[in-house]
Amino acid sequence: MKTRSSRRPGPASGAGAGARGATQAAETYLDLVRECPLRIIHTEAEYRQAVAMLDRLSDLGPARTEDQTQYLLALSIFVEKYERAHEPIPASSGVEMLGYLIETHGVKQRDVAAGTGLADSTVSEILAGKRRMNVKHIEALARFFKVEPAVFLDD
């Protein structure tokens, strides 16, 4: 009968401990909680500490252990709660989102028109605020940018 080895090897034990580094191998769930407790974030300093921890764990990518992944998921809930209360996302219009997506994707209006099947003039008029987006426009833009259609709905 096979027995499972401990999921939490110490810094010098377990296969691959040297490859991951003693620090990462020793980071069990409880080690991470001791370093940055899982609790409601009240101050900017606590927020910065939590974000630094999220960044550090995210940077591990596929090398992240199950404990690290579970901790990251739990901590992200507290960070999100703090951000919603302290850094609300300003409302934006569908046109503003379209402009943002064009800019961040590094495409031009004519690329959007060609990729969506919309006329160049239609894309131009939407961006200029001369034409409102209809369902056909929203669906085509959502497919092109690979986002949810709701992104283009005005708040």
Image (spheres, rainbow, N blue to C red):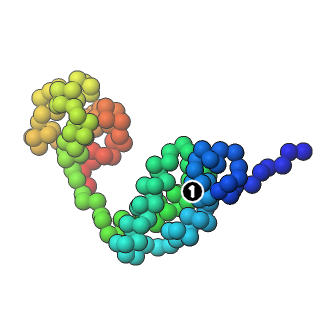
Indicate the position of residue 69 as horizontal and vertical percent values. Answer: 56, 53
| Residue at position x 19%, y 47% in the image | 96
Q: Secondary structure at mark 1?
A: helix
Closer-to-camera residue (153/97): 97
Please name the residue that numbered disc 1 is placed on.
23
Q: Residues within 10 Å of mark 1 (few under 14, many from 20)?
A: few
Indicate the position of residue 82 as horizontal and vertical percent values. Answer: 39, 68
Quarter containing the N terminus: top right
Identify whether 18 is placed above or below 42.
Answer: above
Q: Amino acid at mark 1?
A: Thr
Quarter containing the C terminus: bottom left
Image position of 99 (left or right of 18): left
Quarter residue 152 falls in = top left
Image position of 124 (left or right of 63): left
Indicate the position of residue 2 as horizontal and vertical percent values. Answer: 86, 45
| Residue at position x 15%, y 38% in the image | 126
- Does any portion of residue 98 appear in the rendered image? no
| Residue at position x 32%, y 69% in the image | 86
- Tell which residue pokes out farthest to the right in this image: 1
Closer-to-camera residue (94/90): 90
Number of marks: 1
Identify whether 35 is placed above or below 134.
Answer: below
Identify whether 69 is placed above or below 87.
Answer: above
Closer-to-camera residue (37/141): 37
- Does any portion of residue 105 appear in the rendered image? yes
Identify whether 60 is placed above or below 32.
Answer: above
